[in-house]
Amino acid sequence: MVFSEVREQVLLVDDNPQNLKILYDTLDDQHYRLLLANSGDKALSIAEKSKPDLILLDIMMPGMDGYEVCETLKSNPSLKDIPVVFLSALDDVESKVKGFEKGGVDYIAKPFQPREVISRVATQIRLRRLEQALKEKNRELSADNVEMKKKLEAQREQLAHFSRLSTMGEMAAGFAHEVNQPLTAITNYSRVAHRLLGDNPEDNQVTNKAMLATTLNKLEAQSHRASEVIQRIRGFVKKPKSGKQELNVTSLLTDVVQFAEVDVRNNQGRVTLELPDALPNVEADEIQVQQVTLNLIRNALEASFIWQQANNAFDEPAVVEVSAYADTRNVWVEVKDHGCGLADDAEQKLFHPFYTTKGEGMGIGLSLCQSLIQAQGGKIGFRRNPDRGTTFYFSLPIVH
């Protein structure tokens, strides 16, 4: 099987038949596919159909001259990248400058030398090949970048999920205790109800019936409490939802504070939530933002507990303050503690992977938080409080 050689197309444009013949003969043995046009209109028509790799364009033509043809080419998105080399007997500087201003890439003065024409055409064809190869490589790199971005996003979501599972492992005992309380109450109330059903003297029927109704109401309340705890656990552990969605910040932060109840008890602290009457909705991944906020609250509670231990200050529970406010573009969430504070070099190290101040920590918590917030289009940082402790903050873009 014989494959035909791919040849670059060169469009020759001149209203003078003799000049066209000379150009054609000069380039005929250079392995180009030569196209001919004797007017500006024909040149544009051929260019539209054939998309040549180079155009040799005479300037002085009746009707539409070369400058106008070049302007028209450059205004057409499908033709604007075709290089144009002007041909003209006008050899003054002004004519050449005007040609370059119209979009030409080179200028050949008439009468031209065949070797000069061959050399300049070959140079422009090589540049054209390089330009096309560069564009193709850029397209490949762009596609690779998109694919790499997808992989990084998938890895980030997987790491966030593992981090949530790790958090759940640490909180498991506390959640077990939290679920066990309403289950124990349900068992006790069930025994009371059975006893009331067994005791049925005629003169005590009304009293027993009232007590039974009260007991059943308490049973129902405790079952709802247990169900809410389990739902919170399921909501926190579930896989991240793909893509961002419009979120109500007040509801999101309220849920996170409930998630932190176990850590509140373990660290003998308290979490307050102070929010304005209305906050604009944000665009973010709900589960990932919950993960970041819970991580910051847990760190704040631990820092507060460490300070209490060091100063034997357990008279009152340590308070962690969660708050939020909005500016014109973002909602800002802040988690403030009055704990042990940060090291002097925290600015340089704190968000680096595997840096930790905890004896058993892996050092991925704050690094992951930073990655997750940046994926939402937000920023994360901290500042030292004037009195004691640290305030961590992050932003989420408002839905406009």
Image (spheres, rainbow, N blue to C red):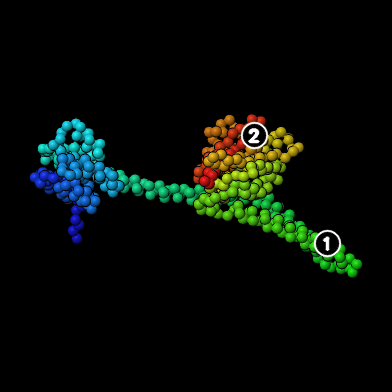
- Real-space CA distance between mark 2 and mark 1, rounded to the nearest whole angstrom: 51 Å
- Residue at figure coordinates x 8%, y 45% from the top left: 18
- Residue at figure coordinates x 19%, y 42% from the top left: 66
Mark 1, secondary structure of its residue: helix
Q: Is residue 363 visible?
A: no
Q: Is residue 12 left or right of residue 349?
A: left
- Residue at figure coordinates x 21%, y 45% from the top left: 54
Write down the residue under mark 1. 211
Estimate the x, y position of residue 337 in percent, counting from the top left: 65, 37
Nearer to us in this view, 282 or 39: 39
What is the three-letter code of the residue carrying label 2? Gly
What is the three-letter code of the residue carrying label 1? Met
Nearer to us in this view, 114 or 301: 114
**Rendering quarter of residue 390:** top right
Quarter that holds the N terminus? bottom left
Which circle marks residue 389 in the picture? 2
Estimate the x, y position of residue 222 in percent, counting from the top left: 73, 57
Which circle marks residue 156 in the picture? none
Q: Is residue 1 left or right of residue 224?
A: left
